[in-house]
Image (cartoon, rainbow, N blue to C red):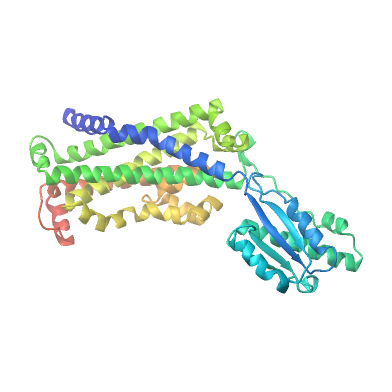
Amino acid sequence: MSELMTIVRREFLERVRSRSFVLSTFLFPLLMGGLFGILSRMGQGGGERHLVIVDQAPAGVGQTVQQVLSTPAPPTGGDDANSYRIERVARPLEQVRGELIRRVQAKEIDGWLYLPANVVQSGEAQYRARNVADFSVVGDLTRAVTRGVQAARLQTSGIAPAQVAALVQPAKLSTAAITRKGEEGGDAKQTFWLAYIVGLLTYMMILIYGMNVLRSVLEEKTNKIAEVIVSSMNASHLMLGKILGVGSVALLQVGIWAGLTVATSRSGTLAARFHIPESMMKSASVPPATLAVTLAFFVLGFFLYSAVYAALGAAVNSEQEAQQFQIFAILPLVLPVLFLVRIVGDPLGRVATVLGLIPFTAPVTMAMRLATAPVPPAQIAASLGLLAVTVLAVAWIAGKIYRVGILSTGKKPSLAELGQWLRTA
């Protein structure tokens, strides 16, 4: 036990005292916060567009289009609405096309909207601009032309536009999650992003620190340090010490990030700085029991993949060789990300349930499910049990490969040779 703790302490202190750990621990939240701040500032206001309406449409259509564009309906967030400066000309397009092209090229205007004489019958208009890939602008123009055409058609049929607008007024749907405390939480978009962030963070931490175990094994193997260490201690204890030491570093870093997040969210600094609604902050709060279960999946998932990476590092001779096999090791972690929409959209469905019971996909899948909806305790217990048994089995197999692999250099072992290592170790 003393030699095991020596390895754990060495791996832990070596990484915690490194400059990279300090920088990544405190710079990562700052960089993420800065990124969200930049995105939030960039999203405030869609900017002003200077457009010319070439109006050949029947009377009233052009005026309606201009009125709608001058007072656009803001999007959901209310901060990204486009504003428009409109000129209307009643001359035929053929007479003004050259001048409009010159003004666009000179950046005097952003573009023009042509309303032909038959726009009410055909429902077709033309938009020409430097950039026609801005979907928000295209959407605004489509909405404005639609309003103008509909108003003209309704006037012809004798139906009041206001009456039709009242009849087709869309309904609004309010959403809230049902928890043990009752109705609380945010809307579907907030729940989706919470599950995405939790799942992605679990995936990143397992991947990053699993690679740390692999690099550590490769470094000691190529530098012949492992030969000296295993002469005085059991090889399995060396592997377990590496996994526990690196895992402690991962838990410490996640704990620091969680503490910073809780402190800033409770003080209101996070919500005020990035204009996050109170409902979203409430929906992002995770109950302690759910947090504990998520942490259990993270720890077991880390042990599982660290054992795989330790065995991989012992079986190869360089990081280039390890990269060739790494895709097979991380593929199960990628699967939940590929099925993200299915898992979050139906966290109690078949896909989410099956992926949550498979040990190699359970850490990320269950993190997403737990952040989305209450998962039945029986499924949580079954998933944790299967994951724990798999960790023991993989650690036993990895230990056998590790005992022989850390002392084997030169040719990359074949599958037959790996089987021989398992039988002889």
Q: Quadrant of residue 281?
A: top right
Instruction: Examine the rendering and report whether any part of residue 346 can be seen.
Output: no
Quarter holding the N terminus is: top left
User: Quick one: 95 or 297, which is closer to the camera?
Assistant: 95
121 shown above or below 227:
below
Q: Residue at point 10% right, 51% down?
A: 408
User: Residue at left 66%, top 59%?
Assistant: 139
Toward the viewer: 284 or 380?
284
From the top left corner, tell me how far across and down residue 317 is, in percent. 15, 52
Left or right position of 118 against 188: right
Q: Residue 407: horizontal and vertical position, in percent?
A: 10, 47
Image x and y of residue 71, in percent: 75, 50
Residue at image x 30%, y 54%? 329
Task: Examine the rendered structure and indicate whether residue 341 appears above or below residue 198.
Answer: below
236 on left or right of 83: left
Q: Is 167 displayed left or right of 158 in the figure?
A: left
Foreground: 289 or 146? 146
Residue 341, image x, y percentages: 52, 54
Nearest the viewer among 380 and 283 is 283
Label total for image? 0
Q: Residue at x 36, y 34 (%)?
A: 25
